[in-house]
Amino acid sequence: MANPGILDGMLLLIRRICLVAAIIWAVVIFILSAIPGDAFPPRPSFTNVLAHGAAYALLGALVFGALHRPRPQAGAKVTVLTLLAAIGLASLYGVTDELHQILTPGRVADPWDWLTDTVGATLGGLAAWWLLSRWPVRRRRRRPTPTTPHN
C-alpha cells in the first residue's frame, strides 16, 4: 500500500487541478456563448443537446473534483452534499450562460438548454463521484485499548 501522506498530497493536487480546470472550462463556455447565432452552420437539434450536455458534464465533474474531500468518518452524507453543491454550482452557471446569450446577437435564453446543462452536470458529477470514490483513503487507526489481565 502506498504511503498515506503521498495519497493525501496527490488528492490535494487533483482537487487544485480540477479547480483550475473548472475555471478555464467556464471561461471556454462563456466564449462559446458569445459567438453570434448566425456564425453556426445549420445543424440538427439533437447536436445542441449533446453539446450542452457534454459541456456541462465536464463542468459538473470538474466542480465535484474541486470540492470533494473524502472523509471516511463522515460517511455518505458529506459526499451527497458535495455532489449536490457541484450540480447546483454548474447549474447556476448554466443559468448565467443562458442569460448571457440574451445579449448575444442571434442567440436566445432557452430553458431547455438550461435543463440539458443541469442533466449534464448531474451525470458528470456522478461520474466524478464514482471515480473518486475508488481513491484510496487514509483511515485513522484505532489506538489499541489497554488490556487488563484476567485473573
Image (cartoon, grey):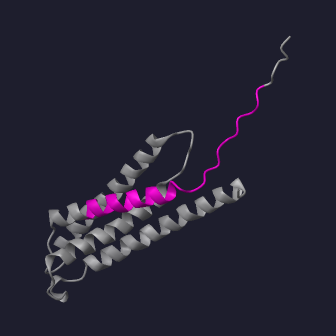
Front residue of 85/150: it is 150
> Does 79 appear above or below 125?
above
Give the magenta-colored segment's residue range. Answer: 117-145
Residue 71 lies in magenta, yes or no? Answer: no
Q: Tell me which corner region of the image, top left, top right, bottom left or bottom right, holds residue 37.
A: bottom left
Q: Residue furthest top?
A: 151
> Does 65 appear above or below 84?
below
Q: Quadrant of the N terminus?
A: bottom right
Estimate the x, y position of residue 71 in percent, counting from the top left.
56, 45
Estimate the x, y position of residue 102 in percent, counting from the top left.
16, 71
Q: Tell me which corner region of the image, top left, top right, bottom left or bottom right, holds residue 6.
A: bottom right
Q: Residue at x 45, y 57 (%)?
A: 130
Q: Quadrant of the C terminus?
A: top right
Estimate the x, y position of residue 144 in percent, counting from the top left.
76, 31
> Does 100 appear above or below 95?
below
Residue 131 lies in magenta, yes or no? Answer: yes
Estimate the x, y position of residue 96 in percent, counting from the top left.
26, 64
Q: Tell me which corner region of the image, top left, top right, bottom left or bottom right, holds residue 126.
A: bottom left
